[in-house]
Amino acid sequence: MDSSRFLGFLSSRASVRDFTPTPLEEPEIDGILESARTAPSAGNREAWDVVVVTDWEIREALAEAALSQPHVKEAPCILVVCANYIRSMSRYGERGILYAIQDATIACTFMMLAAHAAGLKSCWTGAFNEEEVKEILDLPGHLRPVVMLAVGRGKIPAERTGRMDLSEHVHRDSW
Ligand SMILES: Cc1cc2nc3c(=O)[nH]c(=O)nc-3n(C[C@H](O)[C@H](O)[C@H](O)COP(=O)(O)O)c2cc1C
């Protein structure tokens, strides 16, 4: 893929929050999960884990924990991507906290883009009560839920949101 096609692919993704109830096929979920294995990670420690949630009652509970955001229960699949602190801190100490969060974030980014490549829709969901999510999913203490990626088939065409001008982000050689 050349770079302009790649940019076109990235630009055609948008968050979708209105899903049909059609479940994802197992191969679709597997493809998304495989993509995360290709992500870089600090020291190749792969300090991320994911809980794949398709059960309706658990999705409903997760939606409650996510400030009652309806798309979290309506999406047929929620990928709860977690930072695994032990895997990273065992090598990097305190710095491993940051690395594990970065590992989880980039793994989730790859999953989001893999979903897009498969023609699925998604919504990165970061607003949730971490303690409630830990309890719902029975997460061990060294796992921190970082993102809930809601994935499914979109009911409405995704619309692209606006962006700041690039010059507001980019600084050359120094601030
Ligand atoms: C860190 C982070 C947290 C987010 N949390 C939520 C959220 O809790 N609920 C939601 O509906 N969208 C959430 N989003 C999606 C953003 O609202 C969305 O990406 C942004 O408006 C740009 O739109 P786009 O994804 O369509 O390009 C989050 C995105 C990121 C990166």
Image (cartoon, grey):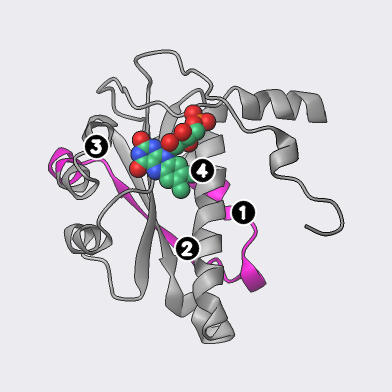
Cβ–Cβ under 8 Å for marks 4 and 1:
no
Answer above or below: position of 67 versus 139. above
Mark sitting on residue 159: none
Q: How many residues crowd around disc 3 within 10 Å: few (fewer than 14), some, or many (20 or more)?
A: some
Q: Nearer the viewer, mark 3 or mark 1?
A: 3
- For the record, the magenta segment spans 33-60
Q: Mark yes or no: residue 95 visible.
A: yes
Does the stretch in magenta take in 158?
no
Name which residue lies at 40% across and 26% down: 16
The residue wearing badge 4 is: 111
Mark sitting on residue 69: 3
Kind of residue at disc 4: Met
Answer above or below: position of 158 versus 91. above
Name which residue lies at 57% across and 45% down: 110
In the figure, is residue 147 to the left or right of 112? left
Write down the quadrant of residue 60 in the picture: top left
Q: CA distance from mark 3 to mark 1?
A: 28 Å
Looking at this view, is 107 or 22 the one in front? 107
Label 1 secondary element: loop
Q: Nearer the viewer, mark 2 or mark 3?
A: 3
Queried on whether the Cβ of the residue with tag 2 lies below 8 angstroms from ligand 1, the answer reads: no
Q: How many residues crowd around disc 4 within 10 Å: few (fewer than 14), some, or many (20 or more)?
A: many
Q: CA distance from mark 2 to mark 3?
A: 24 Å
In the figure, is residue 91 to the left or right of 130? right
Q: CA distance from mark 2 to mark 4?
A: 12 Å
In the rendered image, residue 25, in percent from the top left (x then y), is placed at: 37, 30
Answer above or below: position of 137 versus 124. below
Kind of residue at disc 1: Ala
In the rendered image, residue 80, in percent from the top left (x then y), is placed at: 35, 51
